[in-house]
Image (spheres, rainbow, N blue to C red):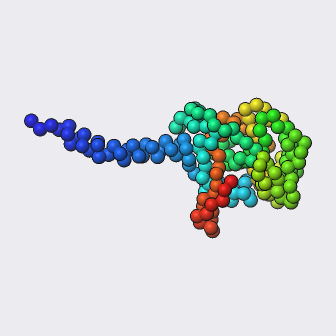
């Protein structure tokens, strides 16, 4: 009597490497690196609508795939980081800049940022946020004014296009644990095609 399990096992052995590779790719994309398409002009001039951005899913911790469970904590979000997070209002993915971290007394007046009473302005349209000089767009005005102290475990995120950004000045603080990626660079921009612009 012929053994019918042999062809089945043989097919399984054939497909096993492919299935393992697909599984590894899914895990890598959900836990290590991914990409994000910028939907709006809220981060102009740093990011343009349609930009494709490489994001580091493990920058703030290695997470269990498809969950928010942090397996291994890494760095905390820092001033100046461009991050991807869910909107606290409706869960929509947002890309914004961290401008203040826990303990900071931050004010934004007329679109101009100050941390602990020290203005971030470094010249026309440039602010020093963390260790970065950041171009700021005030062509649509400055957006909502705020003066707050960032609570523990939270950050304040704001768009670089201050008058055209739905951000922490409207929806409040973002929990550090809710930030699931750090943007590392733009790899594709309309008109330029493939490029690399580090963030």
User: Picture quarter containing residue 62?
Assistant: top right
Q: Quadrant of residue 138?
A: bottom right
125 or 79: which is nearer to us? Answer: 79
Residue 129 visible from this viewpoint: yes
**Above or below — where is 72 with respect to 27?**
above
Quarter of the N terminus within the rendering: top left
Q: How many marks?
A: 0
Q: Is residue 165 visible?
A: no
Residue 170 coordinates in the image, percent (x, y): 78, 42
Against 177, residue 190 (above or below) is below
Q: Residue furthest left?
A: 1
Q: Residue at x 69, y 57 (%)?
A: 47
How far across and how far down the image is residue 97, in percent? 73, 48
| Residue furthest bottom in the image | 191
Q: Residue at x 64, y 51 (%)?
A: 184
On the image, the x and y values in percent for residue 143 come to: 82, 50
Q: Residue at x 75, y 50 (%)?
A: 159
* Residue drawn 53% across the image and 42% down it: 30
User: Is residue 14 shown left or right of residue 89?
Assistant: left
Quadrant occupied by the C terminus: bottom right
What is the quadrant of residue 114 in the picture?
A: top right
Could you tell whether 87 is left or right of 115 in the image?
Answer: left
**Residue 140 vs residue 174, the one in the foreground:** 174
Towards the viewer: 68 or 163: 68
Percent x, y for residue 161? 77, 54
């Amino acid at each position: 009597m012929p053994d019918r399990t042999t062809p089945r096992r043989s097919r399984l052995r054939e497909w096993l490497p492919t299935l393992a590779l697909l599984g590894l790719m899914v895990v890598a994309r959900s836990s290590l690196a991914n990409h994000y398409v910028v939907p709006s002009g809220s981060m102009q001039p740093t990011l343009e609508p349609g930009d494709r951005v490489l994001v580091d899913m493990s920058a703030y911790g290695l997470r269990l795939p498809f969950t928010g469970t942090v397996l291994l904590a890494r760095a905390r979000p820092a001033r100046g980081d461009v991050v991807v997070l869910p909107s606290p209002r409706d869960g929509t993915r947002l890309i914004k800049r961290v401008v203040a971290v826990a303990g900071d007394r931050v004010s934004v007046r007329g679109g101009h940022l100050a941390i602990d009473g020290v203005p971030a302005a470094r010249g026309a349209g440039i602010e020093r946020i963390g260790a970065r000089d950041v171009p700021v767009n005030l062509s649509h005005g400055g957006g909502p004014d705020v003066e707050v102290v960032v609570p523990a475990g939270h950050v304040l995120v704001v768009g670089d296009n201050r008058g055209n950004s739905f951000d922490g000045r409207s929806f409040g603080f973002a929990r550090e644990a809710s930030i699931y990626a750090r943007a590392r660079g733009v790899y594709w921009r309309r008109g330029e095609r493939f490029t690399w612009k580090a963030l």
